[in-house]
Image (cartoon, rainbow, N blue to C red):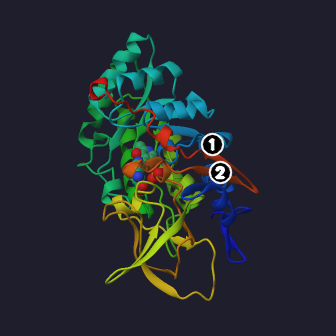
Amino acid sequence: MHHFTYHDDRLFAEDIDLTALAEQIGTPFYLYSEATLRRHISVFRDAFKDTNALIAYSVKANSNLAVLKVLASEDAGADVVSGGELQRALKAGIPPEKIVFSGVGKTVDEITMALNVGIYQFNVESEPELNAINALAGGANKKAPIALRINPDVAAGGHEKISTGKSEDKFGIPWSQARELYAKARAMEAIAIKGVDLHIGSQIDNLAPFETAFKKIAALIDTLRADGCAIERLDLGGGLGIPYGEGAAPPHPDAYAQMIKQVTAPLNVQLIFEPGRMIAGNAGILVTRTTYVKNGEERKFLILDAAMNDLIRPALYDAYHDIWPVVREPETPLEKYDVVGPICESSDRFAKARELPAAKPGDLFAIMSAGAYGASQTSQYNSRPLVPEILVSGERYSVIRRRPDFETMIAGEEIPDWLG
Ligand code: LLP
């Protein structure tokens, strides 16, 4: 459920008329609905309210400080994967004791920063990483709280590029090495084993792979405990899919929660979740204007002022996003368009042969479900400045990231003396 609705055929974000807003901000821009963010996190939280679960929002999905601040005010923790994300989470007021640190390549600087602030848990993805954390924590006279991320060898995820739980993926510790590495971790001076972690993929639209993986991990916890490991936490990662269009029906968080409670009830562990897309995805849109309509030999092209550098999901994962006209004119006939951006790549295409109301230059469109992995995956390719981000709350809005001007965009670049 989200708060993007038509009033008299004009698209509104909560109580804000997007046509008027686009005049003021200029296009393209991202827009997030605060009420939708709050709703999504509360639906997730309510699904687990009878447990003491930690909901550690996965910052990579949308890392804007204002978005993090909204989620912090809903008591969310954070799942971070870099020093930058850790600093963002702290700056937004998420307390370190609600922060978990994931990722296969944590650097010395990042581990040190996390030890210094006292995060809740390192999700450790390899033996060399475990050794590095042990050495750094030992050097600082600390004990690092850790979970090992175990790769359960279960295939899941909306696209091969976002599946992480198979044995050939780079993620996690191979199933066959899990017990041995826990035994090694137990012997390490500066390591405090807290739990087990897994994350099998993203945009998972049915419960079966989750259930298979979680049952495997539950059995592993029994084995580890029998080996003498005190396991008190179970981090189940993120990955719950969202509806990207009409007819899509991924599981409701309540069904997900019910399955999880059944599988994990006997374990008596604190559950940790790392939802990203489920919180931010349908809380955001990308608003863009038509630059040209071009009649090709075989196809019609709707050329927008947004491009793959602004939203890379269709180009990278063949992702589907609904595209809504910002103003609906019921009489307008439908046309089939390839919806593209201005970048010099054939993959700069948001949709192929998509039926939309016939458009003319200047017409506004909203690319829907763009709140997760949209702005956080942007680049300045083709020297296109990063697009602004707007947060709407009722009838208020605020620019939560400005559009950089040309000078700002090139501010970090230097021409060496020898080039004159
Ligand atoms: N935890 C870990 C360890 C992860 O790697 C991820 C996502 C999450 C949690 C959050 O997963 P979510 O609940 O958002 O599915 N850029 C891709 C998605 C990449 C997901 C990477 N990891 C996309 O646009 O579809």
Please say whether residue 50 is visible from this viewpoint: no
Callout 2: 10 Å neighbours few (<14), some, many (20+)?
many
Q: Residue furthest right?
A: 395
In this rendering, the answer to whether 142 lies above or below 297 is above
In this rendering, the answer to whether 86 lies above or below 199 is above
Residue 27 placement (x, y as % from top left): 56, 59
Callout 1: 10 Å neighbours few (<14), some, many (20+)?
some
Question: Please, what is the three-letter code of the amino acid marked with disc 2?
Answer: Leu
294 relative position to 3: left or right = left
Kindly identify which numbered label has been placed on residue 55.
none
- Asked whether the beta carbons under mark 1 and mark 2 sit within 8 Å of each other, the answer is yes
Residue 138 placement (x, y as % from top left): 39, 13
Residue 319, image quadrant:
bottom left
Residue 36, image quadrant:
bottom right
Q: Earlier in the sequence, mark 1 or mark 2?
A: 1
Q: Residue furthest front?
A: 420
Residue located at (36% from left, 38% from top): 149
In this rendering, the answer to whether 282 lies above or below 406 is below
Which residue in the structure is indicated by mark 1? 66
What's the CA distance linking mark 1 and mark 2? 8 Å
Pick the residue in front: 327 or 134: 327
Residue located at (40% from left, 48% from top): 383
223 relative position to 401: left or right = left
Q: Is mark 1 within 8 Å of ligand 1?
A: no
Query: Which corner quadrant holds the C terminus?
Result: top left
Query: Which corner quadrant holds the N terminus?
Result: bottom right
Which residue in the structure is indicated by mark 2? 391
Pick the residue in front: 305 or 109: 305
Pick the residue in front: 173 or 10: 10
Residue located at (44% from left, 57% from top): 311
Residue 134 placement (x, y as % from top left): 35, 19
Question: Please, what is the three-letter code of the amino acid marked with disc 1?
Answer: Ala
